Image: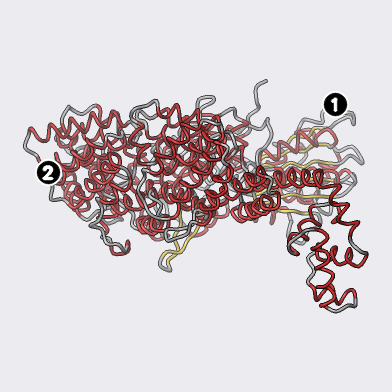
Amino acid sequence: MPTRRGKAGRDTAGDLQGRARETALLSALAGEALRGEVRVVVLSGPVGMGKTALVERSARTCGREFTVLRSTGLPAWSATPYSGLVRSTLSRTDGGGGEETGDGGSPEAFVGTLTERTTATEAARTLLGRLRPGTPLLLLLDDAHLIDAASLRALGLLMGEESPPGGLLAVVATERPDVACELLGLSAATPGARRITLQGLSTGEVAALVEAEGVRVPPEPRIASLVRWCDGNPLYLKAVLDHLALGSAEAFGEPDVPPSLTAAVARWSQTLPEPARHALRVLAVLRTPSTVPQLNQIAELPVATRDLELLARSGAVRWSERGGVPHVELVHRGQREALYRGIPLHVRQDVHRRAARALAPPERWRHQVAATDAYDAPLAERLLRAAEQESREGHFSLAARHALDAARVAPDGADRQAALLDGVRLLIFGGETHAALRHREAVLRTPAGPLRSEALGLMSMVAGRGAAASRYLTAARQDFERSGRMACAAAAAAELAVVQNFLARGEDACASARFALAHSASESVSATAGYALALGTALTGGAAAGLAALGHLPQDPARVATHDMETLTCRGMFRGLTGDLQGAVADLDVTLYHRVVGRVPESNVTALVHCVWTHYLLGEWHQARRRLAIAFDLADEHGRGADFGILHGLSAILHTSTGRLKEAEADLEESAALSRNADYGAPAFHTTVAQAAVRFLLGDHREVVALVTALRRTTSNLPRALLYGSWFLPIVGVSYARLGRIGEARQALDALRGIAGDGPMLAMTRLWLEAAVHEAEGDQAAAVAAYRAALAVRGPGGDPRPYRALIRRDLGSCLLRTGDNDGGCAELRGAAGEFTALGAHPLRQGCEELLREATAAARVECGPRCDAIWAALTSREREIAELVGRGWTNNEIAGDLFISSKTVEYHLRNIFVKSGFPDRKRLRDWYQDTDRAS
């Protein structure tokens, strides 16, 4: 059945997402109106927030029990008195749900007598005369700010002194609630009146909307990108979702503006006065906040403060303070893009010309380029000089814009192509991946050459196409070398080294990095090459080898120079992988405060990935979540699917640890889908490690082993396995042991022992795996000793709290199997407490289940003996045993029983002799673990 569309192309048929509270309120007020009350709801909010959809829902859900009067405002009618009533429609029901026949639905039938001289009271009474006596009225006013004043005054009387005797529910939808309420005679003191301001949908509400539209729901961070793009506005969301292919979740971060949205926003803008409409055009062209004097300088028509206030009341713009000066700006990026695309080309160019005259460089140059269709050699030369200057100073995004603008106006075709390729390269160095990838088709149309190959290589790299990036950058380096441009060859070699590390080709990466270091005097190129050399060394010799290669860095990360932030990122990675968790956090935190631009945008996301994992191992899960959110934002900015895949894997581990299994599965699905899009193995490797970690936490050891077995079949994963062994070898080895595959468990243990490093993490996990192997071999005593040794590990580098809690849980289980019920329960209680402190609720529940089973078994085992112990005690001894079992001290027991503390001690000694318990702790545990406590 086709859906019905409301104004501006919105879907009004299905359920409204995110409006449950408002819908429930309307339903409740309808019930009160049916009992003869007068109720008024004023719905306000910017265009697209769903006001009309709520009005339509009211008509569908309440219309069978009311006489319905509708009126919708249109600017074309706004100058004629009572035009809102002339255009209104009246429909009545027969009480059984069917519409009456007759002239009830004809507007002229009940407003034909209205003239300009008709008073509002007369108009209201005319309307009332057409209603069935005692029938409640549902009054629906859409776009009430566009209904003429005379009609609003008459309709307002129906909500007050001329209200129908059968009750009334009025639903008023408006972008300008103050104007509409004033004409309707409503105020905060009006009885039965409510005002609701609709806000943008939240991330969760958008997820429900996406699902309802039949589009595959991406994980929360991807949806959050779309929410930020349009501030959660349902109109924009629905237009984007309608534009996507069915079942697709692509382009959530940077959606293209659909033509339907451009048309809808253009229709809405026609409802505004021309000065306000032109102010919106100027703001869309400027792309930045503007002062009122600046707007008036650029606008063709004078823009008065009242026009901007009208836009602000409509939710179309917002005011802000900058340096104490009021500025006005558009609300979100989606609005700006939709408005800009809807401006006719000749009008847009005219506004750009005006802006160019009003603004100073470099903004002037941008508007000059946008305003012209002709080549301009002097302007192109100025832009290229500016791009070179900004690039030298590290302002790569601005340099890229200048170069790309020069590519539009340079008269010579070769100059245009060179400027385009340089601009794309600078965009990538500035971290503007989305913008760079939009130029791919234009780059492909340029003639073959090293600059083209380098640009395509960088674009392929940030798009997650590592193999393609390697081919392009290899060609660029070779062509630069053949032409003698060694500095350019060195830059391409440094970029190639980074890609070769992506492909786990550590030796090749080291060779490329050494070439770059030998042939470049550029600090930027040398820094990228140094970073790649350290990572390549680690891929060939392990994290400890990579760490040894970075001995030149100051120990204090705060003293590391800004140009060495990438190498500091490497040191933080290697420290974490070799067990120095606190040292890793110290290094990585410093890199996060130094945004690395001008080089391959790799180190910031990499630093955040390792930061998240390190905080997780330290038990600092709240901090891990915060870092993960930042990482998602940064990945969204760079637009690299490979980054998203790795981050979703980390998110799945965090969700699983805290019991959010549905969210974890969604993350794993997204991680797997994104890793399949890459043509190199790193994303799939990290996805598989995350899947293994999740299955381990869920106790699925068979799946852990299956995943790792599949991982090892790929030769390119062997260097990554060497580098990241400390992340996955412990859980893989323990899983082998739990399945009785002792030989493979010992191989994992040998590999873990082969990882050099400091800090308690490696020592603890080795002993944990050793204990699991002993347990699998049936040597319970050796297993208990190894578990206890693991828990005794301390030292600098940070305590891996999740591992410690898991080891304590396993020790408790092992002790229970040896028959040490007391010791086992004590360790399980301790593990449950540690899991509680971490927020690991599923693991805590697992400990509690083991405790319940152990307690039940103990009761069955010692039932007769327990009764014998109790029977052997005197009545006074039983009293004291009970109070000790409840945790009372000797002094508290003495005071309660009116005896001395020495007498309590005397009875306790007798209790210990008769029961065989060595101390009061064992007596208390016995009492609490039996039915005595109940």
Specify the label residue 98 is tagged with.
1
Q: Earlier in the sequence, mark 1 or mark 2?
A: 1
Depth check, front residue: 574 or 325: 574
Inspect the image, locate mark 1, and give the three-letter code of the amino acid beneath it: Gly
Q: Is residue 429 left or right of residue 386?
A: right
x and y percentages locating residue 516 in the rendered image = 16, 43
Q: Which residue ends up furthest to the top in the rendered image?
A: 1
Element type where label 2 sits in the image = helix
For label 1, the crowd category at 10 Å Cα-Cα, with few meaning under 14, some 14 to 19 and many 20 or more, is few
Residue at the location (27% across, 51% down)? 548
**Residue sitting at x 33%, y 57%:** 594
Of badges 1 and 2, nearer the viewer stands 2
**Residue at label 2?**
487
Percent of width and height locating residue 447: 17, 27
Residue 826 is at least partly visible in this image: yes
On the rendered image, what quadrant is the C terminus found in?
bottom right
Classify the position of the N terminus by image quarter.
top right
Residue 59 falls in image quadrant: top right
> Gap in Å between the C-alphas at discs 1 and 2?
83 Å
Front one among 24 and 264:
24
Residue 79 position in % (x across, y down) = 61, 45
